[in-house]
Amino acid sequence: MIEAIEFRGSPAPTIGVEWEFALVDKVTGDLSNSAAALFDRVVELDDPASQGRIHKELLRNTVELVTGICTTTAEAMADLRRTLGVVRGIGDDLGVNLYGGGTHPFAEWSTQQLTEAPRYAELIERTQWWGRQMLIWGVHVHVGIDRRDKVLPIVNALLAYYPHLLAISASSPMWSGQDTGYASNRAMMFQQLPTAGLPFQFSQWGEFEAFVADQKTTGIIDHVNEIRWDIRPSPRLGTVEVRVCDGATNVRELEAIVALIHCLVVDIDAQLTAGTLPREMAPWLVQENKWRAARYGLDAVIIQDADCNERLVTDDLADILTRLEPVARRLDCVDELASVAEITGGRGSYQRQRTVFERTGDMRDVVALVVHELGR
């Protein structure tokens, strides 16, 4: 039986941000399984506002900071900064730093401990080696959508911008003591899990409901939120959730990424309403773009459209930023959107990490760089 999935539409294009961090030992730079102690301290604060914004994740080396429902990028960043201050204070007491990269350069998966929760235990039981390998951290951005019939067309249209978002956020070039040759090894790792990776390009909500019904009938999922696509509907929240991006190593780059996603979704919504959306890209083109951005980052030559035109991702982004300027004015994020150009005109996180390693040959220095970039 196909059950109806209610989408609780948002009356405005609000945003919410989820920012994942690894916990690393202040002395060794290695991952620290200290999240349980950190959350005990959070409870001791007896501050419901902070508790609601600091979340557990699969492994005890991870903490996730989340915002409330925000209207602007600046509001979301202020929200995150407040929570960040709380968590960093606790981390200092516990002897750990927050690490914002998409992967850790030398940590071993076999020493990482699982957070105690039935759903996490079930995930590891099913996924085994691949599940235990998931030493990855990312950024998720929710944007409110007012009507259910818009959701899937917006998800599909966002796929054309997948390589742009991954290229500017790529921060995971190293894995288990080696340079992988990829700008984003995280993107390649995460897609190994069942229900993760690129979304199916459904055109009607009924198709999505039938898909979810099949997933539940065959025991693949129990709940719709176990569909871990890189871009997915979030029916309970009334949003489209963009999960493309690697972890952000600093607030400045995070606010650029959030502003770009906010503007893209609002612009796509306007094009959808006006009937001017470009033809959707074929799934095999979207898949190739994901690989190119993961492999080459800001040097990727991407497929621009359904007609297979190609262009350097940074050149394409420059034109996109110009096109989105009026949208940014309406969303009050002109400065934040403009800071995307600081990433494309400089060096991305994955490049900065490689520069340090090439200079010192010590991956602990890479950890130190990422920790330092978060600032105080």
Image (tube, helix red, strand yellow):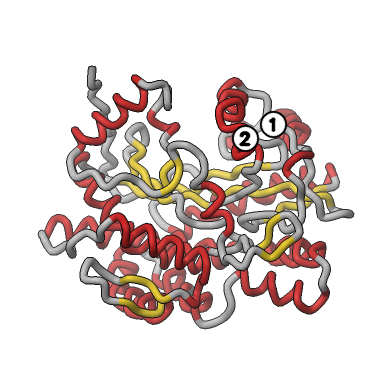
Amino acid carrying mark 1 in the image: Leu
The answer to whether residue 185 is above or below residue 45 is below
Question: In this orientation, does residue 376 appear?
Answer: no
**Which residue is disc 1 drawn over?**
114
Q: Quadrant of residue 9?
A: top left
Q: Residue at x 51, y 70 (%)?
A: 297
Q: Quadrant of residue 148?
A: top left
Q: Earlier in the sequence, mark 2 or mark 1?
A: 2
List the single residue furthest toward the right: 27
Classify 10 Å Cα crowding around label 1: few (below 14), some (14-19), many (20 and above). Answer: some
- 141 sits to left or right of 375: left
**Which residue is disc 2 drawn over?**
58
Classify 10 Å Cα crowding around label 2: few (below 14), some (14-19), many (20 and above). Answer: many
Amino acid carrying mark 2 in the image: Leu
The answer to whether residue 347 is above or below residue 155 is below
Quadrant containing the C terminus is: bottom right
Q: Are marks 2 and 1 in contact (CB under 8 Å)?
A: yes
Question: In this orientation, does residue 216 appear?
Answer: yes
Q: Residue at x 42, y 26 (%)?
A: 220
- 85 sits to left or right of 159: right
Q: Does dot 1 land on a helix, a strand or a loop?
A: loop
Where in the figure is residue 304, as x and y percent of width and height? 30, 71
Where in the figure is residue 17, as x and y percent of width and height? 48, 49
Q: Which mark is residue 89?
A: none
Q: Count all numbered tags in the image, as a single digit.
A: 2
How much space separates mark 2 and mark 1, taking CA atoms?
A: 6 Å
